[in-house]
Structures are given as C-alpha cells and as structure tokens.
Image (tube, rainbow, N blue to C red):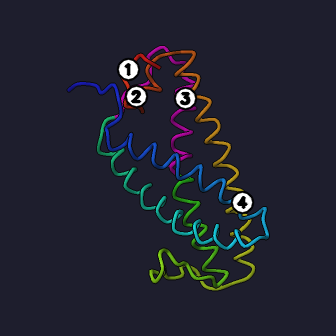
Amino acid sequence: MNTPIRFSLALRALHWLMALMILAMLFIGVGMMSTASDARRWLYELHKPLGILILVLAAIRLIVRLVTKAPPLPADLPAIQKLAAHASHVLLYVLMFALPLIGWAMLSAGGYPISLFGSIHLPPIVSQSAPLYALLHAVHVTLALSLFGVVLAHLGAALLHGLIRRDGVFSAMGSWKRGRF
C-alpha cells in the first residue's frame, strides 16, 4: 500500500477551517473578557455556537484522522521532535474537545441558556452551582490560554518545517505541491 505524502483532502479542509475558527474563538474570548460595552453580549452569543461547532468538527476530524493514513514524519527528524509532534497533536485534540465541553458545563452550572441559533437550545450537562461555575470558569480560561500556547508552538513548528527544513511536513497539510514549502 502506498504511503501518502499529504493528509486526506477532508482532513486538510477540516484543519484549515478549524484553525480559523479556533483563532477566532481565542480572540473572541479575549474580546469578551476585555470589554464592558454592548459588544460583549454579541461576542458571547457568537462564542457559544462557534464553540459547539468546533466540538462537532473535532469529532468529525478525529474520525477522519483515525480512518485515513497520515504521511510519515521525515526519517531524519530527531526522536525528541517526533515525540513533541505527536504529543502536541494529542494535546490539540484534547483541548478541542475539552474547551467546548467545559464551556458548556460552565454555562450549565451558571444557569445560563446555551442558545445556538435562535430557538435551538442545548440542555444543561451539570446541575446549577455557583462554586462549580467559578471552578469551571477558571479551568476554561486556563485551558484557553494553554490552547493559545499550543497553537503558537504548532505554528512555530509548521514554519520551521516549511521555511527552514523544507522537508514536506508543512505541505502535507496544504493543497500545494510537496517540496514547495
């Protein structure tokens, strides 16, 4: 069986779509926390359905990732960098699932409705509790900051592969020809 040189088209499309959505969510989250204007309510209303959409896409992405072959990392890549690449990918998947679920639980604990689009509402997943809300809020913020750090490390590694090593790792997630980056 042939070894792929790129990820599947579905996985590449999900990767770039979710990258945009996750970056948007991080900036929306910062905007929500740093403004007291009327925009805050609008940002909250945007944050909730976008988070649930990321959760759904993360599930689809995980399934696609598990049923399709991934291109191998370069043979000359040091073992520690291979380990870091695998660990960071696992951490990204964990955070893509954990952040929306903890956000959903946090809103449930706070007694806030989770409206997706107009009349579509999600049921609470935990009982209403002010101490639990405070705990989940702290965890949600901490994990969001962690996700921001992991995304920056992921971006740094992608640039290292694309601009310095030029080993095809970066182009494996792109639609361009291998070897260009």
In whole angstroms, how far apart are the C-alphas of marks 3 and 2? 10 Å
Callout 2 touching callout 1 (CB < 8 Å): yes
Q: Residue at x 51, y 41 (%)?
A: 89
- First of labels 2, 1 by sequence position: 2
Q: Which mark is residue 31?
A: 4
In whole angstroms, how far apart are the C-alphas of marks 1 and 4? 38 Å
Classify mark 2: helix, strand or loop: helix
Indicate whether 7 appears above or below 137: above
In whole angstroms, how far apart are the C-alphas of marks 3 and 4? 27 Å
Callout 4 touching callout 2 (CB < 8 Å): no
Callout 3 touching callout 2 (CB < 8 Å): no
Q: Amino acid at mark 1?
A: Arg
Classify mark 1: helix, strand or loop: loop
Q: Amino acid at mark 3?
A: Ala
Return the residue at label 1. 178
**Mark 4 against mark 2, which lies toward the viewer?**
4
- First of labels 3, 4 by sequence position: 4
Q: Amino acid at mark 2?
A: Ala
In whole angstroms, how far apart are the C-alphas of marks 4 and 2? 33 Å
- First of labels 4, 2 by sequence position: 4
Number of numbered discs visible in the structure rendering: 4
**In the image, residue 134 lies in the stretch drawn in magenta:** no
Tell me the quarter of the picture where residue 157 sits: top right
Q: Residue at x 38, y 20 (%)?
A: 178
Q: Few, some or many C-alpha atoms within 10 Å of disc 3 (few <14, some 14-19, many ≥20)?
A: some
Residue 118 locus on image (x, y percent): 48, 80
Callout 3 touching callout 1 (CB < 8 Å): no
In whole angstroms, how far apart are the C-alphas of marks 2 and 1? 7 Å
Tell me the quarter of the picture where residue 153 sits: top right
Residues rendered magenta in the picture: 70-93
Return the residue at label 2. 172
